[in-house]
């Protein structure tokens, strides 16, 4: 059953410069981002972006610096106004909202976590976390109780009366996350939220987010330039280049079938055995005998089971029931680097 779409981004363009609307025709006629800048002094930030973001899931938008990913996320809550297009949230076009409707949308529906924390420096941690509730006109006592709940959940109990500059970067980002969650918004917008953190702290924050998501099931739009982070967090990934979506899909789909060299270059150095799952390469053929492997097991672990059993095939199961099989050769092929020529691996023997 297909997932319900929470946010639908349709035919979205953003062009900075003089007469941006007039520039759309040039873009639609095939002018490149560089040519648009050189000939007309306009910057193409988003080029006909179409993405359906499933409800209660994690959608990752990734790309190199300048690809348009941060510009895109700021369109969801209209921190940036588009040149053309639609952003539909629960059936309503955000771009048609009045100032009052937009204010309520930002207060109650979409919360944002920024890369550089964006905390209020002269307010305590409790006051920072309570900020969104305060502008929702929640009573001081209720706001304090709800904020305390989220301060505790992100591991900052005891720091309520500290100020942001007294905390480490990782702790400050926990404050930003708690502030976003405290409003109980259905949509969480995270713009490079962990990229300013040291690697170990970054991994820790990813764990915090994934742990909370297992319980809360928010609709999360997560921006990153880091593929490892995208693969770890994202249920769906969209890759941008020069404002254009070049590929969309699950982590498995993107790794197994990168569409071009740009995407191939992104994925070529990752440990495929720790990302790809048996379900992505299994066959429907059922075996009577052999070791059993659960369909969501990563290939690296599955290879160990087959190796220990000294066989070339294994039974694939789901909830204890046999659903297919997987061959050793397919697993080895799947974890090899993609072809430099095509960017794809399709020869599973």
Image (cartoon, rainbow, N blue to C red):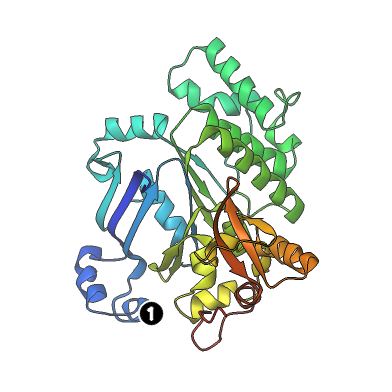
Quadrant where the image shows the C terminus: bottom right
Q: How many marks?
A: 1
190 relative to 228, above or below: above
Query: Residue 252: x percent and y percent?
Result: 53, 63
In which quarter of the view is residue 334 placed?
A: bottom right
| Residue at 25%, 56% in the rendered image | 85
| Residue at 59%, 53% in the rendered image | 317
> Of 116 and 112, which appears nearest the observer?
112
Q: Can residue 292 be seen?
A: yes
Query: Residue 64: x percent and y percent?
Result: 53, 68
Which element type, helix, strand or loop, lies under badge 1?
helix
> Of 94 and 120, which appears nearest the observer?
94
In which quarter of the view is residue 123 placed?
A: top right
Query: Residue 330: x percent and y percent?
Result: 60, 74
Q: Can residue 225 be seen?
A: no
| Residue at 25%, 64% in the rendered image | 20
Return the residue at label 1: 34
33 relative to 200, above or below: below
**Left or right of 187 in this view: 151:** right
Query: Residue 211: x percent and y percent?
Result: 63, 39
Q: Residues within 10 Å of mark 1 (few under 14, many from 20)?
A: some
Q: Residue furthest bottom?
A: 341
Q: Residue furthest front?
A: 288
**Left or right of 287 in this view: 238:** left
Q: Residue furthest right?
A: 308
In which quarter of the view is residue 91 placed?
A: top left
225 relative to 182, above or below: below
């Amino acid at each position: 059953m297909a997932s319900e779409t929470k946010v639908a981004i349709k035919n979205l363009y953003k062009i900075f410069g003089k007469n941006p609307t007039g520039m759309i025709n040039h873009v639609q006629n095939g002018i490149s981002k560089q040519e648009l800048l050189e000939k007309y002094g306009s910057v193409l930030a988003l080029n006909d972006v179409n993405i359906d973001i499933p409800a209660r899931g994690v959608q990752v938008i990734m790309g190199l610096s300048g690809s348009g990913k941060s510009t895109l996320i700021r369109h969801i809550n209209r921190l940036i106004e588009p040149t053309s297009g639609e952003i539909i949230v629960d059936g309503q076009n955000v771009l048609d909202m009045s100032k009052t409707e937009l204010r309520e949308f930002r207060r109650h529906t979409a919360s944002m976590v920024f890369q550089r924390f964006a905390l209020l420096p002269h307010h305590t941690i409790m006051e920072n976390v309570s900020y969104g509730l305060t502008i929702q006109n929640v009573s001081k006592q209720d706001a304090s109780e709800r904020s305390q709940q989220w301060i505790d959940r992100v591991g900052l109990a005891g720091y309520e009366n500290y100020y942001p500059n007294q905390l480490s970067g990782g702790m400050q980002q926990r404050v930003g996350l708690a502030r976003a969650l405290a409003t109980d918004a259905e949509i969480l917008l995270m713009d490079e939220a962990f990229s300013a953190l040291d690697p170990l702290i970054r991994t820790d924050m990813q764990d915090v987010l994934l742990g909370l998501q297992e319980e809360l099931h928010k609709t999360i739009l997560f921006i990153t330039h880091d593929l490892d982070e995208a693969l770890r967090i994202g249920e769906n990934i969209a890759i941008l280049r020069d404002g254009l979506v070049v590929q969309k899909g699950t982590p498995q789909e993107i790794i197994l079938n990168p569409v071009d060299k740009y995407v191939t270059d992104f994925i070529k150095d990752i440990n495929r055995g720790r990302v790809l799952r048996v379900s992505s390469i299994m066959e429907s053929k059922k075996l009577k005998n052999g070791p059993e492997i659960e369909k969501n097991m990563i290939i690296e672990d599955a290879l160990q089971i087959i190796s220990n059993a000294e066989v070339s095939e294994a039974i694939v199961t789901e909830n204890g029931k046999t659903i297919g099989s997987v061959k050793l050769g397919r697993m080895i092929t799947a974890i090899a680097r993609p072809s430099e020529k095509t960017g794809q691996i399709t020869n599973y023997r």
